[in-house]
Amino acid sequence: MLRILTIVFRCIWAFAIIATAIGIGAAYGWEKHGLVAAIALGFVGLVVSWPCAYSPALFFELLCQLLGEFLMSLI
């Protein structure tokens, strides 16, 4: 049962991370340069999100690093 829940969680996690990265990339590309950039940056979001979709620990480690650097720059 625990194994099934782990698999379901990983599938939901991967879908959420990949969909968010593609959406952000496509929206940014559309806003700045139009259709071709939306397609290109959506693909970039897909490629960049694969490692974070595979490992939630990697995602949270990168998030903590970025937030730490941002907060230190404010001081």
Image (cartoon, helix red, strand yellow):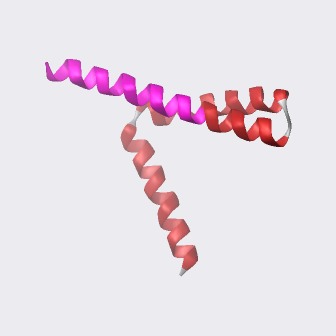
Q: Is residue 7 magenta?
A: yes
**Location of the N terminus (image quadrant):** top left
The answer to whether 61 is drawn above or below residue 52 in the figure is below
- Of residues 54 and 26, which is closer to you in this image? 26
Kindly indicate the quadrant of the structure image that contains residue 41. Answer: top right
Q: Residue furthest left?
A: 1
Residue 10 in the image: above or below residue 62: above
What residue sits 46% from the left and 31% below the top?
16
Viewer-side residue, 73 vs 23 = 23
Q: Quadrant of residue 54?
A: top left
The residue that appears at 78% across and 35% down in the rendered structure is: 30
Residue 53 image point, x, y percent: 46, 31
Residue 48 makes an appearance in the image: no
Which residue is located at x 47 percent, y 59 percent? 65
Give left or right: position of 37 versus 14.
right
Tally of numbered tags: 0
Is 47 rendered above or below residue 64? above
Q: Is residue 15 visible?
A: yes
- Majority secondary structure in the magenta region: helix
Q: Which residues are magenta?
A: 1-21
Residue at x 76%, y 26% (from the top left corner): 39
Q: Position of residue 46 (x, y in %)?
A: 61, 28
Looking at the picture, tell me which residue is in the foreground, 57 or 45.
45
Q: Percent position (x, y) of residue 67?
A: 49, 62
29 relative position to 4: left or right = right
Q: Does the segment drawn in magenta span residue 14?
A: yes
- Horizontal side of residue 23 vs 2, given as left or right: right
Residue farthest bottom in this picture: 75
